[in-house]
Image: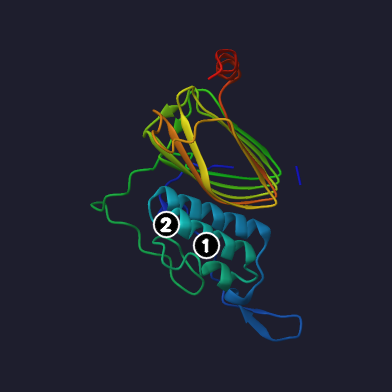
C-alpha cells in the first residue's frame, strides 16, 4: 500500500482555539492569535469537531469534505477557524466564550457513531453485528479498509458510501443477494473489481452505492467465500 469518534454536543467540547491577545514576534513586532501558525494536533482537533458536526446534521458530507481539505491546508489559526465560523458552540479567536445554554433549551440527540471512517497509515475492519448508517463517508490515506456487511445491522435498504481515498484499498463483503453500484467512482491510477451484481435493473435487499474520488487505490466488492464457491459450482 503506497479513527471514528462518537459524536456529541459541540457546546461541550468546542474550544477550538484560545484567546490570548497579542504575542511578540522574533523581530520585535506583535502578532495576534489568528496569525499564529497551527500544528498538526490543532488540525486534527478541528477535524474531530467537523466530524461531530456531520453526526449532528450541521454539515453535509460534501461540506465536510470541502472543509477538511481547507483545514488540512491551513497554516494559521485564522485560516483554520474559518471552517468553524458558522458552527454554533465553537469559540473563535477574539470572541468571548458563548453563554451557557439555559436549562429549558433542548440539546440535540447524539447521532449514532460510525458515519465517518477516517484513517492514516492504518488498517480498519468492520465485521460482525456492527450498526450501518444510511450513509458512510470514507477518508483514508495509505490505509486498508474492510467492511463486512454479512452480519451487519442495517437501518436502510440502500447505503451510500462516499469516498475520498488516497493510496488505500477498500474491500466490501456483502450477503449473497446484495447488489453493489461502483459506477459513480472517479478514478485516478486506481482499479475496481466488482464480483457482485450491479443492481442496474433490480436492486437486492441490500444495495450499496459507492461514489466519490479514489486516487492510486483499489475497490473490491465480493460475496463471502462460501457464496462465491456455491455460485461457481452452480454456474450462476
Disc on the earlier residue, 1 or 2 = 2
Query: Disc 1 marks which residue?
Result: 67
**Residue, x 47% and y 57% (percent of image)?**
62
Q: Is residue 14 visible?
A: no
**Residue, x 67% and y 70% (percent of image)?**
37
Q: Quadrant of the N terminus?
A: top right
Q: Is residue 236 above or below residue 106?
A: above
Locate residue 117, reporting x and y percent.
55, 43
**Residue, x 46% and y 65% (percent of image)?**
91
In terms of secondary structure, where does tag 1 sit? helix
**Residue, x 41% and y 60% (percent of image)?**
89
In terms of secondary structure, where does tag 2 sit? loop
- In the picture as drawn, the residue positioned furthest to the left comes out as 104
Q: Which label belongs to residue 59? A: 2
Query: In this orientation, which residue lies closer to the viewer: 28 or 165?
Result: 165
Q: Are marks 1 and 2 in contact (CB under 8 Å)?
A: yes
Q: Is residue 223 above or below residue 55?
A: above
Alpha carbon separation for disc pair 1 and 2:
10 Å
Locate residue 165, reporting x and y percent.
62, 49
Amino acid at each position: 500500500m503506497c479513527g471514528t469518534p462518537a459524536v456529541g454536543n459541540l457546546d461541550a467540547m468546542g474550544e477550538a482555539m484560545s484567546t490570548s491577545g497579542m504575542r511578540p514576534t522574533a523581530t520585535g513586532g506583535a502578532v495576534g492569535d489568528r496569525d499564529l501558525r497551527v500544528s498538526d494536533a490543532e488540525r486534527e482537533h478541528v477535524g474531530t469537531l467537523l466530524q461531530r458536526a456531520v453526526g449532528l446534521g450541521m454539515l453535509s458530507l460534501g461540506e465536510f469534505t470541502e472543509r477538511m481539505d481547507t483545514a488540512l491546508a491551513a497554516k494559521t489559526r485564522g485560516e483554520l477557524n474559518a471552517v468553524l465560523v458558522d458552527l454554533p458552540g465553537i469559540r473563535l479567536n477574539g470572541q468571548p466564550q458563548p453563554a451557557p445554554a439555559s436549562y429549558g433549551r433542548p440539546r440535540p440527540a447524539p447521532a449514532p457513531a460510525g458515519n465517518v471512517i477516517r484513517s492514516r497509515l492504518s488498517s480498519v475492519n468492520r465485521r460482525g453485528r456492527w450498526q450501518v448508517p444510511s450513509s458512510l463517508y470514507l477518508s483514508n490515506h495509505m490505509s486498508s479498509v474492510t467492511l463486512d456487511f454479512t452480519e451487519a445491522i442495517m437501518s436502510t435498504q440502500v447505503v451510500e458510501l462516499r469516498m475520498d481515498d488516497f493510496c488505500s484499498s477498500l474491500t466490501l463483503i456483502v450477503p449473497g443477494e446484495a447488489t453493489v453500484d461502483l459506477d459513480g467512482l472517479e478514478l485516478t491510477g486506481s482499479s475496481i473489481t466488482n464480483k457482485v451484481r450491479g443492481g442496474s435493473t433490480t436492486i437486492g435487499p441490500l444495495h450499496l452505492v459507492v461514489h466519490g474520488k479514489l486516487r492510486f487505490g483499489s475497490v473490491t466488492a465480493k460475496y463471502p467465500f462460501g457464496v462465491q464457491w456455491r455460485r461457481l459450482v452452480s454456474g450462476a
